[in-house]
Amino acid sequence: MVNEAKTMNLFRELLRQRGYYDDPTICVEEQASDNKKVQKLLKCASKSGLGKGYPDFIITSSKYHNLIIVVECKAEISRPKSATVDNFKDYAVDGALLYASFLAKEYDVIAIGFSGEKKNLTCLEHYIQIAKTTKPHPYFSDEILTLANYNEGVNKSTYKFNQDYNELINYTKELNEKLQEHKIKESKRALLISGVLMALRNERFKADFKSYGSIETLSNNLYAAICAELDQSDVPDSNKNALKKGYDFIATSFGNNHKNEKEFLTNLIDEADKRINGFMVTYKYIDTVSQFYVEFLRYANNDKGLGIVLTPPHITQLFVELAGVNKDSVVLDNCAGTGGFLVSAMKTMLEDAKGDIAKETSIKHNQLLGIELDVDIYTLLISNMIIHRDGRTNITLGNCFEQNTEAIKKKFKPTVGLLNPPYKNKGKGTEELEFVLNNLSMLERGGKCVAIMPISCVNDVKGTSCMLKRKILEHNTLEAVLSLPEELFVNSKVNTVTCAVVITAGIPHPKGKKTWFGYCRNDGFVKKKNVGRVDANHSWDTIKRKWVDAFMNREVISEFSVMKEVTATMEWCAEAYLEANYGKLTQADFENTIRNYVLFQLKYNETDNGEGEEV
């Protein structure tokens, strides 16, 4: 006869082995909880659909307020989970997920289904359900972990990151509206927020900002704290005055035009500390400053007018992997923007250092190089690196074409180039491939350059672009070209269709060598109203792994990738060489293509005032 009490005893022993009963910050309860919030959430969670729910174990902690573990035990090991996962009375996982669905209204939930009566013959399954979501996901292994490891695992999960990042995007929209109401210019909004984040690093300002008696005192001290952080940084002295000047509007923007300004600015600083710094504590090396810059300039057209297109974080991470960045890499971005590539590279490099303090110091001071021409964006770039507490020594304000490339190459020996060059505006401006060649000229022989640019640059078979393609092949090796998602920059309201090129520096392209072309159009992101493109289905990690593995192994996959020998007078994209399987086409495919084309034309003409020029 089955005995569920034996199963619960076995689970108690697992908890005991992991120290759950010895830690005073952990509360392990059975059947019911003294926690009022938990009681309220389980009030209607009965397995029968009527009345309260009584999980076998409820685990909370005073250290991790937002996390809860709920456990359901069943004696019969043959019944861990039903096919439909809705037989709550008879199956362990089904019951645990029922309780999780109620608790997830307020908590990040780890749901555990545990079954079996013999110590060496049990079944344990984990699921996580992030707060305020409706879908659980299988996660963790089949062993009980410490609560600290559970908390870390949840925070590092794709599901938690996607939710938190979407909340950050929503906050940028709220913040943009507030700054609009207070007449803060679009071009100054990202600077203001980056300045606030820098000032919050100043312990005295952070402790005192709520106590300042007037808006003048608050704004002046905010500016003073920013200047103090710049003075203490290792930014070259020659650039500090320009950086301080970029923030001096803060001392004059408040005090004359608005009511309740002190309350507004105090709340702005407090919210930034909680909502932005809180995000950055959990996700240390995500380029949040760029997200604010994109959002604040979406309606000003300034970023588009300058040809500036900021690379989404998941693409900067992809490029880091394509380039094979590790702790010994020296990474150069000669069109650094707000630093997205450098932040992503730094994350990977520090992780690879595995706690070696000396190596971490070398990475931050010697192995991250950036060049940026625009003063305002350079200011954001420096603030971005200061906020991340790293890597600003070798960030240069200037034109990449006016740098002493041989001196840079000799001093730093860059091994990886990552860049997203400014895109020509209405056909005018520096060719994107010129920036790529400039980057390659500073890399060590055998170094890897990964660049994103309009796909038209690599598809031109005559004219300037063709001549630049010929230069690339004469002195470097074209390893791969990836066709990227068509609406990659929809969050910036830019229509440019792009590709990524992977090039080995300093080694002429061998005659007969084939290049790998990948059709990487579907990154799993979907458009959501008022949010933009998001990884709603949590599929990006799997897709990225497929792309990177296929590139590293030069795999030829039907309708996805191909190996092809090309010259400068040929198109450099997968679409030109992949063989389509027309047998799969349906009437619906035809209709959707026509519909999408018409919608694209309408949007394209509207955005570009009918001129149809790329940005």
Image: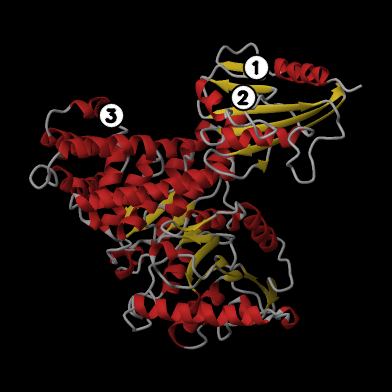
222 in relation to 546, above or below: above
In space, the residues marked 3 and 2 are separated at their CA atoms by: 31 Å
Q: Nearer the viewer, residue 89 or 534?
A: 89
Q: Which numbered disc flags the more N-terminal residue, 1 or 2?
A: 1
Query: What colour scheme has been applied to the protein in the rendered image?
Result: secondary structure
Task: Give the label, 3 or 1, closer to the camera.
Answer: 1
> What is the residue that sits farthest to the left in this orientation?
256
In space, the residues marked 3 and 1 are separated at their CA atoms by: 36 Å
Three-letter amino acid code at the position of disc 3: Lys
Q: Is residue 399 left or right of residue 156?
A: left
Q: Is residue 470 visible?
A: no
Three-letter amino acid code at the position of disc 1: Tyr
Q: Nearer the viewer, residue 192 or 458?
A: 192
Numbered tag placed on residue 206 in the rendering: 3
Q: Is residue 14 visible?
A: yes
Quadrant where the image shows the C terminus: bottom left
Circle 2 residue: 147
Circle 1 residue: 20
Residue 278 lies, in percent from the top left, at 41, 35
Q: Residues within 10 Å of mark 2 (few under 14, many from 20)?
A: many
Q: Which numbered disc flags the more N-terminal residue, 3 or 1?
A: 1
Q: Which corner quadrant of the image does residue 492 belong to?
A: bottom left
Q: Are marks 1 and 2 in contact (CB under 8 Å)?
A: yes
Task: Give the label, 3 or 2, closer to the camera.
Answer: 2
Q: Are marks 3 and 2 in contact (CB under 8 Å)?
A: no
Element under disc 1: loop
Residue 585 lies, in percent from the top left, at 70, 80
Q: Is residue 406 left or right of residue 237?
A: right
